[in-house]
Image: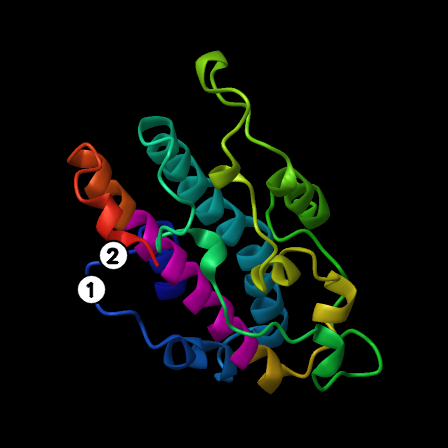
Amino acid sequence: SVIIAHLSNPQTSKKEPVWVNLMNHFRQERCLDGVGNLQDLYMFLTRVALPNAIITNRRLLHELYMARRILPRNVRFRYDRWTLTYTPLTSLPLRPQPSHAVRPVMRSAPTPNGANFLQWLYEPLNTPPAHRPCPDQLLHRRTPLDGFLIEDEFIVRRVEPEALYQRTATVLSLFWWIECMSSDLRRYEATGWVGIGSELR
């Protein structure tokens, strides 16, 4: 689908897609199991796409702080600078029971455990011996995005479809934002981090 194409190869130099419009596909009658597919997309985003985007961003931050160890942590391209408020799933309109059973979102593997990923985020990175201990700048900061990573799939599948459409669009925007931050970091990396000090916020 178009959404998967954006996730697998985000063209961050172009304008961010209007995610809500792209998700109209799930509302169409010809879309078999539209709600179930939307739920699967949401779980894929929060357990696979977002974590992978965070890992990429964190790797680039690692390269930055290995090269500029005394640079403050408030570089604006950090994945953990997302500041929008997190709304718990239980605050959304819910159905009494899930519309679909909990199921893997990938054919070849179980759905990744979000709690394990979040635990990994809070652990110091294993930096090279010459750069130990891990610089404080690389430590994860608690942010609203943490909540998206550990949501209960049982509750996700109880969320009313219209609310899940809107929430999925929010997570897609979060994914796109992190990819844009990583794209900016790559540009600085290509120049040996020249000028990165101007990006402190």
| Colour scheme in use | rainbow
Q: Which residues are magenta?
A: 166-183
Dot 1 surroundings within 10 Å: few (below 14), some, or many (20 or more)? few
Q: Is residue 119 above or below residue 102?
A: above
The quadrant in which residue 44 appears is bottom right
Q: What is the tally of numbered marks visible in this picture? A: 2
- The x, y position of residue 40, in whole percent, is 60, 62
Q: Residue at x 29, y 69 (%)?
A: 16
Prevailing secondary structure of the magenta residues: helix
Looking at the picture, which amino acid does disc 2 mark? Gln
From the viewer's side, name the closer residue of 131 and 156.
131
Q: From the image, tell me which residue sits under label 2.
A: 11
Residue at 18% of width from left, 44% of height from top?
195
Instruction: Name the quadrant containing residue 113.
Output: top right
Give the position of the C terminus as an image quadrant. bottom left
Q: Which residue is mark 1?
A: 14
Decide whether residue 177 is among the magenta residues. yes
| CB within 8 Å, label 1 to label 2 | yes
**Residue 170, numbered circle:** none
User: Is residue 74 positioned above or below 26 on the image?
Assistant: above
User: 69 or 171, which lies in front?
Assistant: 69
Helix, strand or loop at mark 2: loop
Q: Residue at x 52, y 37 (%)?
A: 136
Report x, y in % for residue 45. Answer: 53, 58
Query: On the rendered structure, is 59 left or right of 45?
Result: left
| Residue kind at label 1, given as amino acid type | Lys
Left or right, 38 with respect to 183, comes to right
